[in-house]
Amino acid sequence: MRKIFVLLMTMLILISACQSNIINDCPDGLTKFNKVSLYFGTSTNEGIITNEEWSNFLDEIVTPNFPEGMTIHDTYGQWKRPDGGIVKEPGKVIVHIYDINEDKSENINAIINGFKERFKAQSVIWEEDIICGSF
């Protein structure tokens, strides 16, 4: 049942991500960038992912795919199980901003698949948008 819920939530996020804001022009001094946010739950069937396990995942999987850098947020979220129960868990969000003309889908899929394989996770939420920014 959780798989169905996770699949439905993932589809909803992906559909809404496809309707991201279209930015024609950025204000003076700002440039268009892609912004990807990856949402990871850190609860597994074996417990909470430790700081050491997360650090190893970053070093071995994320950094090689986002070598330019990223921001990581600690999160706390919840979702409703099909039986009505509420699951509350800590999580992480990785935010990566990159050139508007670059395709990072292979890198993003490598991170998502690496997380799923390593931690036996069912899903990672992938959110993408176009932003105006400056470095």
Image (spheres, rainbow, N blue to C red):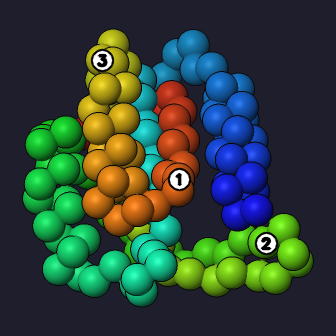
Task: Tell me which amino acid carries mark 3.
Answer: Glu
Residue 24, compared with residue 12, is above or below; it is: above
- Residue lying at 47% horizontally and 78% vertically, measured from the top left: 45
Q: Are the residues at dot 3 and dot 1 in contact (C-beta closer than 8 Å)?
A: no
Mark 2, mark 3: which one is toward the viewer? 2
Place residue 1 in its image quadrant: bottom right
Q: 102 left or right of 66? A: right
Residue at image mark 1: 123
2 or 1: tag closer to the N-terminus: 2
Decide which of 115, 21 is in the foreground and name it: 115
The CA span between labels 2 and 1 is 15 Å
Report whether residue 51 is seen: yes
Real-space CA distance between mark 2 and mark 3, rounded to the nearest whole angstrom: 36 Å
Which numbered mark, 3 or 1, is in the foreground of this view? 1
Q: Quadrant of residue 127?
A: top right
The residue that mark 2 highlights is: 80
Residue 82 drawn at (x, y percent): 84, 68
N-terminal of the two: label 2 or label 3?
2
In what element is the residue under mark 2? Answer: strand
Q: How many tags in the picture?
A: 3
Q: Give the residue number, with chain letter if any, for mark 3.
A: 102
Dividing the picture into quadrants, the one containing residue 78 is bottom right
Q: Please name the residue shown 27% across and 32% down the image.
A: 107
Q: Does the image show residue 95?
A: no
- The residue type indicated by label 1 comes to Ser
The residue lying toward the viewer, choosing from 26 and 110, is 110
Q: Residues within 10 Å of mark 3 (few under 14, many from 20)?
A: few
Image point (74%, 52%), residue name = 4
